[in-house]
Image (tube, rainbow, N blue to C red):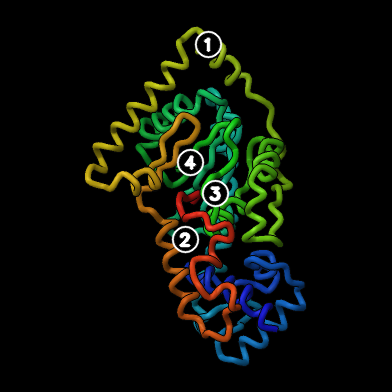
Amino acid sequence: MKSQLFPVWSTLNYFDLFSYPLKIEEIKNYIHFDQLSESEVALALDFLQNAGLVYESDGFYSLQKDKKLISRRKAGNERAAAKWRSANHWANFMRRFPFVRGVWISGSLSKDFMDEHSDIDYFIVTKPGRLWISRTLLVLFKKIFLLNSHRNFCVNYFIDEDHLLIPEQNLFIATELVTLKPLVNTRLFQRFIETNKWSDNFLPDYHPGLLKSVLPLPTSKIQRFTESLMSLLPLNKLNQFCMQVTTQFWNKKFNGVPEQVLHRQLRSELHVSKHHPQDYQNKVMRLYEEKIRKSPEWLQPEDRITAPSFLTKNQITSEGVLA
């Protein structure tokens, strides 16, 4: 029983950071480190409820005895369902930009939840050697035509087709990775998931699914035309220039931030652009580690008592963020 309690307990603790109660089938899907059957999860939940550590209401399980959390979750799920139409619209629009090869949904919408202040976050994959051109064009469009609004057009993570492996490997990154939803180029998305099978170390029972209503979209005629025109330009130099201008702006804007922290928050290389100045992932991981440390000792398997070994099976440090 003890070996079943910790995965269920740690999963509930993780989502408690977001005040997000879970259904039993979701707990099974998001279970940490181990694979449990739904009956094993149910047995562990009964035990934790009898111990006064977990509460159930209307089929939702939480560490907090607060029915408002369930109402909040249901409202957020409904809000997210209404947002998918906008997400599809903008993803279809983005695929027409030069050198864009994949458009996927990340962040809260990828988990079918949005609060009143949530943005629609996009994870963009580009042609190799053209990432910064694509990024610059998309950001300029947002600033000029959308008045820099992030609500439906938040493009904060880019990688290229030759660098699909996400090097930061921890529980937070694994959760964000497996919940990505592809809207453009599902075939490339499947290759991305296979490349990042390390996520199974943290979420062995979660199977990323494709959105049945979304089909792989062909290359846009507009995209082919603009790429053909742009081939007359020195694109390698242009790509380097776009990266230099952006990184210089970020260095000036965030002057005083330690270089190691800045690299984690604003990773800028030829094959990747990540813009997360709030360092959200590290905050979540620190809070999660603290919650697990404070867990009753009898819940913690002996080989996972010493944090952060239970957070990073391969002893890889916590860096980066997808959401």
The type of residue carrying mark 3 is Ser
Q: Which amino acid does label 1 sit on?
A: Ser
Q: Do the residues labelled 1 and 2 touch (CB within 8 Å)?
A: no
Identity of the residue drawn at 53% across and 84% down: 297
- Residue corresponding to mark 1: 231
Nearest to N terminus: mark 2 or mark 3: 3
Q: Which of marks 1 and 2 is in front?
A: 1
Which label's residue is closer to the chain start, 1 or 2? 2
Residue that label 2 marks: 115
Residue 211 got which mark?
none
The disc labelled 2 sits on which kind of residue?
Asp
Counting residues from the start of the chain, the first of labels 2 and 4 encountered is: 2
Query: Between marks 2 and 4, how big is the CA–CA gap?
Result: 21 Å
SS at badge 4: strand
Confirm whether residue 79 shows in the render: no
Q: Which amino acid does label 4 sit on?
A: Tyr
Q: In this view, does 268 lie to the left or right of 175?
A: left
Residue at the spot of label 4 = 157
Q: Which residue occupies 60% across, 38% down?
A: 164
